[in-house]
Image: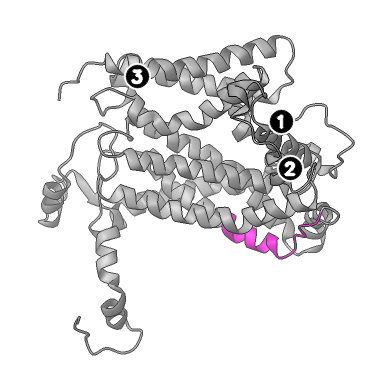
Amino acid sequence: MAKFRKAFPFSKAWLDDRLAISTLDRVLSTEYWIPKNINFLWAMGMVLAILFGILLISGIFLLMYYKPDTKLAFDSVNYTIMTEVQYGWLWRHMHAVAASVVFLVIYIHMFTGIYYGSYKKGREMIWISGMLLFVTFSAEAFSGYMLPWGQMSYWAGMVITNLFEGFSPHVLGGALNAPGLVEWIRGDYVPGDAFLNRFFALHVLVIPLAILGIIVLHFGSLRIPHVNNQDGEEIDFDAESKKYLAGDTKGAKVIRFKWDFLSKDIFVVGVFMIFYFYLVFYHYEFAMDPVNFDPADGLKTPPHIYPEWYFLWSYEILRPFSKDLGLLAFIFAQMIFFFLPFLDRSPNVAPANRRGIFKFWFWILLIDMIVLTVMGKVPPMGIFTKIGFVAALTFILLWVLLPIITSLEKKLKD
C-alpha cells in the first residue's frame, strides 16, 4: 500500500498523496519539453482551447433561455435572448463569432501542420486525432446552425440531410442505398420538432462530450513524439532537457512548456482576443446570415441555399457533378485529409519550401480551397459553374498526385 503523509485534509500534500498532482504537473507541464525553434503558429492549439471554452460558457447561458420547439425557437433566439435578457445579445454575439472564427483558426492550425510536415514520423496520431476534432467541430457547428430555426437553418438542414439518401438505385445494384435513412434522421419526412430536438440534443450534450474526449486524445498523442519544429529538426528531447535542467538554458534546444512556452502562448492568445472582441462588438454580422433572420418556412425556398463559409469548399466539390459523382467527390473530400500521413511518401520532415514539388502542391491546394470557398457562396451559373468545376477537379487531382510527387522527392541533407 502507498505511504500517506500526515497532512491537513485537502492541503497540497494531502491531495498530492491521493491524486499525484505533482506527478501530473511534472509529466504534463514542467517536464514537458517544447522546441525553441517554433513560431507563433504553434500557439493556435491554445487559441482553439480558449475558443472552445468561450463556446461552452456562452452556450450554457444561451441554453437557459433557448426553446427547442419549432414554434418558439426563432423567437427565443431573436427576441427573448436579444432584447429581453440582460446582455443576452452579448452572449449570442460571442457564441456566433466564436463558432465562425474557430474554423479560421482550425484551418490555420491544419495548414501549418501540412506546411511543416507535422504529421510524419511518429506523429500520425496527432494528425488523425486533429482531423477527428475537425469532423466533430463541423458536426457541432452544423447542429448549432439548425437551432435558430430561421430560413437558412431549415433549408440547409433539408439539403444536408438529403445527402443521406445515398446513391441512385443503379449504383452497385443498390447496395449503397439506405431507404428511409433520411426520414429516420429527421424523425419525419421534412424537418420539424423531432429534427430540431435531435440536433439540440447532439449540440448541447453528445457532440461536446465527444469533443472533450478527442481533445484529451489529441493532447495525449503529443506527449511521446513531442511537437514538431519549423526546421523539421530531429531533437533528442532527453539529452536537451538534461542540458536545460543542468543550467545550460541557452545551449539547450528545448524549453519547458510551463511557463516558458506557455507565456508565449498567452501573448498570442491576448492578441487574438483583441481581434475576437473587435468582431464581437463591431462586425458580429459576418457570423450571422441575413436570410436566417426570417422564420423558417417550408413553403418558401430561398433563391440560393448555401452552408456557412467554413463548409463552402466541400459543398462546392459536391455541386458541379451529377448526384452520384458529386456524392463520391464529397465523401472523398471529407475523408482524404485523414490519409495524409500515409499518402505523403517523402522521407523528409521539413518545411514545404525545402521540399521541391511539394511546395507547389501545398500552395496550389491552399489557393484551390480558397477558390472553392468563394465559388460555393455564389449562385451556380455562367462562368462560376466552370470555375467551380475546375477547382473541384483540381482538388481531387492534387490528392491523386500526392503519393507520386512525394515518392520522387530526394532525401534532404542534414
Q: Is residue 155 left or right of residue 101?
A: right
Q: Position of residue 251 (x, y in %)?
A: 13, 44
User: Which residue lies under the disc numbered 3?
Assistant: 403
- Magenta stretch: give its range: 55-69
**Is any atom of residue 309 visible in this view?**
yes
Q: CA distance from mark 3 to mark 1?
A: 33 Å
Q: Secondary structure at mark 2?
A: helix
Which badge, 2 or 3, is on the more N-terminal residue? 2
Residue 264 x/y as whole percent: 36, 49
Q: Secondary structure beneath disc 3?
A: helix
Q: How far apart in space, not on screen, are marks 2 and 1 (Cα)?
A: 22 Å
Q: Position of residue 75 (x, y in %)?
A: 84, 55
Query: Badge 2: few (under 14), some or many (20 or more) residues near its Cα, within 10 Å?
Result: some
Mark 2 belongs to which amino acid?
Glu
- Name the mark nearer the viewer: 3 or 1: 3
Q: Which residue is mark 2?
A: 183
- Dot placed on the residue nearer the N-terminal end, 2 or 1: 2
